Amino acid sequence: IYFEYWKSKRKIVLKSHFKFNDRFLTTFARQFKRGIYEMFLQEYHKITGNGLDNRFNQIRRFARYNIGDIPLYYLVNNGVYLIEEKFSSPKFSFSDSQFNDIETYGFYTLILYGQWFFLEVTPRAELSREIYLKMQCEKINVGGFVYRDLIEIKRITDIDFSLRSLFGGKLF
């Protein structure tokens, strides 16, 4: 609705529906977050069959019924994008370490087209948020060459979809 992607020209073009006012940018970010959390639930359920577990009630209320809010964290990139092999078909991966992070900390890490997101997926995440995010920042070396910062997404423009970090960080 808000942009067109022309693969042959490798170009993203914003449509007139996309606005640079705060209300629009925060609403769009909320829509994006709800979509990410809904996809997590669907994929988790497909892999484990446990997506209807009560510990995911908050995600269900947020993603499906727009009730409440759940933070989504993002690694701000310095312009070096580390992307997975199969760039054309992104997926939610569930390794043993991912399951361990969900059980221990309540977090799930999603890497989508070289962009890193941290999802709070169980109530435990609220209690372990500071510890887990600090641990991830140290592990990934946030503040180093590749990643500049870890932020909570508030506006859709917080996410570098257009790879503006490669061009000095200017927003159009």
Image (cartoon, grey):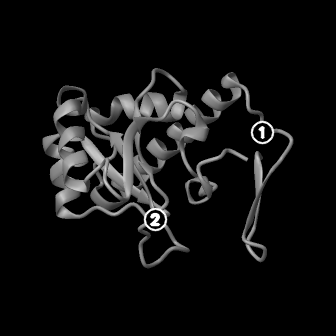
Front-lying residue, 23 or 49: 23
Which residue is under mark 1?
18
Q: Nearer the viewer, mark 1 or mark 2?
A: 2
The amino acid beneath tag 1 is: Phe
Instruction: Decide: few, some or many residues near mark 2? Use Cα within 10 Å; few <14, some 14-19, many ≥20.
Output: some
The amino acid beneath tag 2 is: Tyr
- Left or right: 107, with 77 as reference point: left
The x, y position of residue 48, in whole percent, is 27, 57
Vertical order, 34 against 143 (above or below)? above
- Quarter of the image for residue 131 reads top left
- Left or right: 39, with 108 as reference point: right
> At 61% across and 40% down in the image, what residue appears?
157
Instruction: Decide: few, some or many residues near mark 1? Use Cα within 10 Å; few <14, some 14-19, many ≥20.
Output: few
The x, y position of residue 73, in whole percent, is 39, 39
- Quarter of the image for residue 92 reads bottom left
Which residue is under mark 2?
81
The x, y position of residue 123, in whole percent, is 25, 29
